[in-house]
Image (cartoon, rainbow, N blue to C red):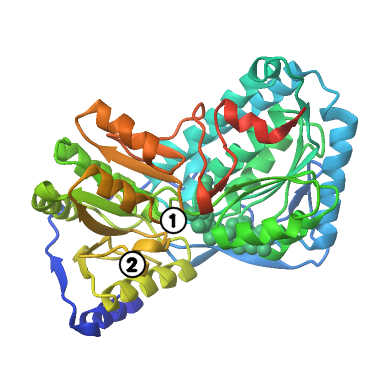
Amino acid sequence: MAKTTQIKKDIEKSNGAVKITTKSTQWNYSPSLESTDHIQLAKRYDLFINNQFVKPNSNKYFDTINPATEEKIAEIAEADEKDVDKAVQSAKTAYEKYWKKLHPRERGKYIYRIARMIQERSRELAVIETIDGGKPIRESRDIDIPLAANHFFYYAGWADKLQFAFLNRTPEPIGVAGQIIPWNFPLLMAAWKIAPALACGNTVVLKPAETTPLTALKLAEIIRDCDLPPGVVNIITGAGKTGAALVKHPNVNKIAFTGSTEVGKIIQKAIAGTNKKLTLELGGKSANIIFDDAPINEAVEGIINGIFFNQGHVCCAGSRLFIQESVYDEVIRKLKHRMKSLIVGNPLDKNTDIGAINSKQQLEKIHYYLDLGVKEGASIYQTDCALPSKGYFCAPTLFLETSQSHRIVQEEIFGPVLTIQTFRTVEEVIEKANNTPYGLAAGVWTDKGSKIFNMTSKMRSGVVWANTYNKFDATSPFGGYKESGFGREGGLHGLLPYVKF
Ligand code: NAP
Ligand code: MG
């Protein structure tokens, strides 16, 4: 709180720009806390290799904390190169000995079993996701965990039907997949990676993010309890160095990475000249476009969902808003009104709309951009919602009067911060929306189907949502253009990175 207050004061002082805040119109809801009584967490977690939890070679552990309370939850093993080697060897043996030889129908049964066990343990997984990562319980309960189970169900179905996915070709597995995931959707990203890899007959070494390892380790327990052949899935924890060791291991045949564009580029360089296959799901700065014929109330809800969902920790967050000039005043008025009712606070409270920022470093990064936006001459708008006195929290923020050249418009902030611009014509907004190094997603709000089709064909982004935002489905491919990466995850397209012909 002290830090946030200080930053707010700094913003007020800097550059003479105006900071507008308005009184919150929140109703006083009684707290509705999700129970944590049913959660069992160990004090310390080891590496999951060959279906066993084993101590790290270095005997080093790091803390994972609850970003809403700043309290330590557990100690997590730090894998070094020797541990990475052990995990990769175990995956290689499992691939040669069992997994590639197993009848695809049997592979499918194992994947179904994982999906069902995720469903059975969904309450526990949702609470742990929220405690470890800071996202509101409503989201982890209703979105992250059900979607993670859906991915396993969906790809379990493909395991024995691959010949129908690739007609007139014979798909073969690749071997050992090294998979590295970020902290914004920890269990869901693990599911996006593991499910298609297993369905296609590959084995896996997965590294979750340093700040959110717990649900991946719970998934390790599930995989052990599902009796998967030892070594088919290995989960190793650690920092960037652990990920780098996995990338360069000679027995890893495929790297699947989701994270920042910066690290994606490092990985691409590291594997240049090898025959490793690579998919990259990287950052974004996605445009959400409101035309004057849009259903405005729904569009406002879509803007809120697009940027404030999961504290803006969404690679495809609708972080650049474009409003057609004739409806600008109406949209801004309604958007500010709606923002005043957003509740920022305890992620375990079912009333909470915006939970905790994932880490201190991420909060500092967001504050850096809040400061920068004001210095660049944009005007900042925040509601005066109360922020908890402990933990990493950030008020939902609008930057009005921004321009294409502002860094806050071009760079990924990865927080609840929305930049706003206007436009007059379709051509103008297409040019502006495409004018970033990224190309992950976009939203288009209009009454006209023809306008939607025109936009989808001209937007350089992997996903274009029409009259909705941030909707995901296991059957639908997801991925980027330009510096947002390459390769697709989800749907039939998500099988392709895990097969060779
Ligand atoms: P990050 O710093 O790139 O980290 C991602 C993962 O890579 C983490 O597990 C990280 O470990 C590991 N890592 C760090 N340095 C590495 C290296 N040199 N070699 C190999 N692995 C390394 O990204 P993040 O900050 O966790 O996540 C936020 C970013 O992910 C945002 O840019 C967001 O847009 C992007 N994202 C994209 C998608 C998508 O589908 N396109 C989805 C979600 C997130 P540590 O955690 O220990 O650093
Ligand atoms: Mg944590």
Q: Along the horizontal axis of the image, is 499 left or right of 477?
A: right
Tags 2 and 1 touching, CB below 8 Å: no
Queried on whether the Cβ of the residue with tag 1 lies below 8 angstroms from ligand 2, the answer reads yes
Q: Quadrant of the N terminus?
A: bottom left
| Residue drawn at 16 percent across, 75 percent down | 18
| Residue drawn at 86 percent across, 41 percent down | 92
Residue indicated by mark 1: 134
| Residue 497 placement (x, y as % from top left) | 67, 36
The residue nearer to you, when weighing 235 against 205, is 205
Q: Amino acid at mark 1?
A: Gly
Q: Along the horizontal axis of the image, is 308 left or right of 117?
A: left
- Tell me: residue 78, above or below residue 140: below
Q: CA distance from mark 2 to mark 1?
A: 32 Å
Earlier in the chain: of badge 2 and badge 1, it is 1
- Any mark on residue 397, and which? none
The answer to which image quadrant residue 388 occupies is: bottom left
- Any mark on residue 405, and which? 2
Q: Residues within 10 Å of mark 1 (few under 14, many from 20)?
A: many
